Each structure stands twice: as C-alpha cells, then as structure tokens.
Image (cartoon, grey):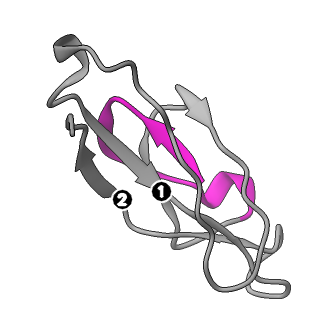
Amino acid sequence: MVTSLVQTPPASLASFGMPGCNSYLSLDAVVLGLGGSTITFTVTFPANPAFEAVPFVQQAVVVNAGVNAIGLIVSNPARSVTGLR
C-alpha cells in the first residue's frame, strides 16, 4: 500500500515492467502489508483539530506473478479524508 498527501496526474509504470499500470501519487510514505485478499492497518493521528479534514490518497500494489515482467499490478487511487471522533 502506498499512501500520499498529494494525488498526481497518471504516470505510466511501463518503464518499470508494468505496462498498462499507472501511478497516481507521489511516494510520501510507503506502508507494506502482506496477507491474503484483505489487509487492514491503522494510521493514528493526534487528537488535534489541525489534523481534521486532511486529504490523502492510497494505491495498492498487488503481487501477481506472470502478469507482467515485474509481477506486480497496482489499483486505482482511493481518496480519503481524516476526521476526529
């Protein structure tokens, strides 16, 4: 899983051996999760109003042997916003 505070225009990953795949974010933070069909992780923000309504974008990277030269595919971007409870 790749997480970023900035969504970028699509950038082709064909030069990395992933034709047909695009990156939609900058590499501000990388969170690696290994598992089956579902991965859950928690990101904790301080309980401070300054962190309320902060937008972020995530894109999954999936191992799929044989799909391309590098054996990875990526998802479309998912946009979210932080909130306080």
Residue 42, image x, y percentages: 53, 47
Asked if disc 2 and disc 1 are in contact, CB closer than 8 Å, the reply is yes
Left or right side of 34 for 48: left
- Asked if residue 29 is positioned above or below residue 43 in the image, the reply reads above
Query: Mark 2 sits on what residue?
Result: 77
Q: Residue 1 carries which label?
A: none
- Residue density around tag 2, few if under 14, some if 14–19, many if 20 or more, within 10 Å: some
The residue under the point 52% across, 67% down is 21
Q: In which quarter of the image is residue 5?
A: top left
Q: Quadrant of residue 66?
A: bottom right
Q: Earlier in the sequence, mark 2 or mark 1?
A: 1
- The type of residue carrying mark 2 is Pro
- Asked if residue 41 is positioned above or below residue 30 in the image, the reply reads below
The residue under the point 74% across, 63% down is 17
- Residue density around tag 1, few if under 14, some if 14–19, many if 20 or more, within 10 Å: some
Query: Mark 1 sits on what residue?
Result: 59
- Asked if residue 12 is positioned above or below residue 28 in the image, the reply reads below
Secondary structure type for disc 1: strand
The residue under the point 22% across, 28% down is 54
Residue 22, image x, y percentages: 47, 59
User: Quarter holding the C terminus?
Assistant: top left
| Magenta range | 1-17
